Amino acid sequence: MPVMRFLNTCIFDHGAVGKLAKTLGGYGVSKPFIVTDPGIKAVGLLDTILEALGDIKPAYVFTDTVANPTEDQAILTAKLYTEHGADGIVALGGGSSMDLAKAMSVLASLGGELSDYAAISGGSGKIKNLPPMIAIPTTAGTGSEVSVGFINTLNNGRKETFASPLLIPNTAICDPDLTLGLPASLTAATGMDAVTHCIEAVLTPAVNPPAEGCGLDGLHRAVRNGALKRAVADGSDKDARWNMMMASYEGALAFTKGLGGVHALSHAAGRLKEKKLHHGTLNAIFLPHLLRHIDGVAPEKFERLRFAMGLKAGADMGDAIADLNGAIGIPSTLKAIGVEASDGPGIVEYALADLAHSGNARPFEQGDYEQLFEIALG
């Protein structure tokens, strides 16, 4: 069973959850606080994790994580963490559960307002002395199990990014078996999140060749080797699930060097709580338009990306992503998922203020985002 040590320790393979109890014991955790969501509980994955705990009894199991976690839930879970005397965290699920677990960890340990720790306002340096966290992904896309940050929709309406090396879970347990049978639509959306991470991380101007190498290998697994299409077509394909979880892991290793305008727009649209928009679906819809928008920028990187995807030299990457979206059932327009023209000004405003905005392959202005939104709206 591979045990990889890059940003953290990652136990990766079919059956990896069997290492959970031993891993918690290694950090001296005897009363873990479990953070997950209603869907994970409903399909029985929570029971799998509780069984893997063996003799360890959780201090509390929180199963009500919402999509696009909120500050209110961070406050609530931090209070529960303290009241029940927890001494560590198990984050089980997709990006939402892991992001909530990280926000809870900050508030439970440090107190104050969540906005005090936002990266864009210089709060990263205030994050310290967090409890041990084990992250167990149940989707292959977000990469939060090895990410330096999390996203939270604050009560002031802003969807903020929080970043610190201390937010990286101490250990990630990546067991592809937990993704077997994941619905095709969710497999597609989370898979395109991973693909977008790989592509945007390579294109951002920051210099980090090892991170780019991770992104290119992840893209190769997901697209050129066909793991994403295979996982969508057959949820029980264990090889496809293994490779998609690896692509997700590598995408997160890659985006240590940054992201770009696709994520700035997706974060901005994701703050529209009432629409319940999936982050991966938003990424997939915006991505082809951004790739066409920056055509001609960083040509050498584009060629490496084309090779990783199995495309011919000079091929239109925007078209290739649009074709991939169509093949796996991703909607082609924002209108198709409930976004309206009236949402545009707010999305553009928040995209300009998003941390990912600074990672574009070339500088973006308001007009760039307005044009991308209009085209993606359909």
Image: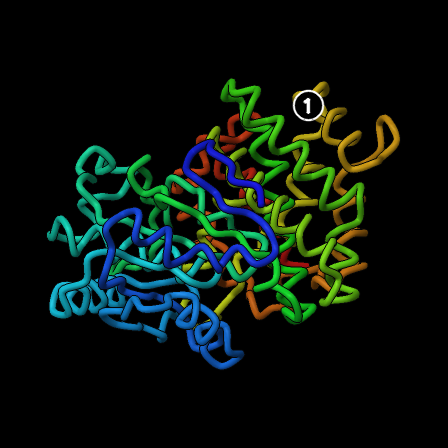
Side of 175 relative to 157 (left or right)? right
Residue 361 versus residue 324: which sits nearer the camera? 324
Q: Residues within 10 Å of mark 1 (few under 14, many from 20)?
A: some
Q: Residue at x 23, y 50 (%)?
A: 28
Q: Which residue is drawn at 56% across and 60% down?
A: 139
| Residue 351: quadrant of the picture | top left
Q: Residue at x 36, y 63 (%)?
A: 69
Residue 284: image location, x then y, percent = 64, 52
Side of 6 relative to 224 (left or right)? left
Q: How is the image coloured?
A: rainbow
Q: Is residue 358 above or below residue 10?
A: above
Residue 329: image location, x then y, percent = 74, 65
Which residue has dot 1 on it?
301
Residue 238 versus residue 202: which sits nearer the camera? 238
Side of 42 relative to 292 (left or right)? left
Q: Residue at x 53, y 22 (%)?
A: 205
Q: What element carries label 1?
A: helix
Residue 332: image location, x then y, percent = 71, 59
Q: In which quarter of the image is the C terminus?
A: bottom right
Residue situated furthest right in the rendering: 312
Q: Quadrant of the N terminus?
A: top right
Residue 346 versus residue 244: which sits nearer the camera? 244
Residue 224: image location, x then y, percent = 80, 41
| Residue 108: quadrant of the picture | bottom left
Side of 306 relative to 127 (left or right)? right
Residue 186 versus residue 239: which sits nearer the camera? 239
Q: Which amino acid does label 1 sit on?
A: Lys
